[in-house]
Amino acid sequence: MHRRESISRAAAALILAFAAACAREAPLVSRPPGASRSLVVRNVRVFDAPGASLLEGLRDVVVRDGRIAAIGPPGLAAADLPAVDGRGGTLLPGLVDVHTHTGSTPNPPWKVSLLPDVGENLAAFLYAGVTTVLDLGSLSPAVFRERERLATGEHLGPRLYAAGPIFTAPGGHPAEVLRAWLPWYLRGYVVARATREVATPDEARRAVAALLPERPDVLKLAIDAGASDVPRLAPETIAAIAAAGHAARVRSIAHIGSSAEAVDAVRAGVDALAHAPWRDELTDEAVAIIAGTRVPVVVTLAIWDLAGAPRTGASDFLPIEREVARPAVIAALLAPPPPLDGATAAFRRAAAAAHDARRRNVAKLRAAGVPILAGSDACNAGDFPGAGLHLELAKLVEAGLTPGEALRAATWENARFLAGESADFGEIAVGKRADLVLVAGDPTARIGELGRITHVVLDGAVLERRARP
């Protein structure tokens, strides 16, 4: 009898241990069952995104059925609605990140994740107040299927725009990185779905035509020889991709690494540049060409700073990064890396050497009136979803933008890039979508206060947020 009881207790312990091991911790965000899509936010300073400043005085903001219905002085009539007291904090439009990779991971590249947690990434974006994202390179067709699930409400996450695979030269970026770091049994599967390697204009046109049934929101091209002469798309192939996209009313955005590559991309007809560039300073000619065509630039300072100077201690991470990051990932990022091969070492040296040039690029683009967009490039190594945009905005302010200008880039400018002049998000105005972020403090004075989020509202519903323990 006693022996059977001991066996039963041991079995029960094993079952409990297994259940605990399999149990998932509470998500970073959730939408409460039956959550109302109407509310009133009282006593807040409202960020005027087009003006890059706060409206004068405190305001109440009324939301009905997921749309902003009224903005006015404190005391607006809304007794029938649940109320949030902003206590003098700042209400901003939901943040917009126009350079993400939702199907990737912030782990260092030598720590391979066989199954990146897309749902966890999407939750982290929302936790950090990012309610709309543009994915500029993920597995196809998986990213388009996720876009559908988010649009229908089957999954909870930010609104997703997606490019799908990245057009590149045979052996070009990012195919060369994927082949270098992925284990052999994943390389073929991932590279075939993450890239389209095209050698000629005809191949490019056929590849675009094959992708169009998935309804990509943009076409992503990689034009970057890197620090070790990686193959890159020829100008005539770039032009073929851009023209094929335009014929189908789809714009293109080009990842570039140098001033010369920026010129090639703009002259070939791309509609935006990703990176400003990352490894050298823009020439005056390049700035004039970019400004003359009004091609916007997604600057992405933070990701290259992280590549050139990896963080060395937990205090190097923003508080909001620590709130969304798994401790094991931070530990992996802080651990000594394995011996680096020649190409990786050269890449790191190039990223570090161009630190100041990247800041001068921002100043040149700003002075020339080039639209500056805000993108984090998360989830790349050390670049956490959602929190990475906070880090990027801090870097933009460091490079000379005012906090208000950086916030305008991450709201109004990004929204207009994605959805045009009539975008129904990226601004707090009557009739706009009620994607909102309430912050304790004034991020227009100190950009770091953007991380002091008290409430995130998605489509009029207040989300529940839980930081990592």
Image (spheres, helix red, strand yellow):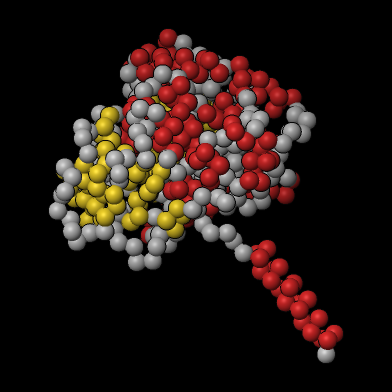
Instruction: Give the farthest residue toward the front.
Output: 87
Image location of residue 181, percent across then percent down: 70, 39
Judged from this view, the residue extending furthest toward the bottom is 1
Residue drawn at x 22%, y 39% as measured from the top left: 58
Q: Quadrant of residue 290?
A: top left
Q: Is residue 274 visible?
A: no
Q: Is residue 227 left or right of residue 60?
A: right
Q: For the view shown, which residue lies furthest in the top direction?
A: 284
Q: Residue furthest right?
A: 3
The residue nearer to you, when weighing 431 against 239, is 431
Quarter of the image that includes the N terminus:
bottom right
Residue at image position (32%, 46%) is 436
Report the number of discs.
0
Query: Residue 100: x percent and y percent?
Result: 49, 40
Measuring from the top left, give residue 112's x and y in whole percent. Answer: 69, 45
For this rendering, which residue is in front, 186 or 433?
A: 433
Q: Is residue 69 above or below residue 283?
A: below
User: What's the residue at 39%, 55% (across, down)?
Assistant: 463
Q: Is residue 421 left or right of residue 25?
A: left
Nearest to the observer: residue 263 or residue 351: 351
In-image side of 80 versus 2 (left or right): left
Whole-percent x, y for residue 137 in the image: 52, 41
Name the image quarter holding residue 452: top left
The residue positioned 38% from the left and 49% from the top of the image is 456
Asked if residue 309 shows in the view, the reply is yes
Residue 35 sits above or below residue 13 on the image: above
Name the residue nearer the viewer: 373 or 446. 446
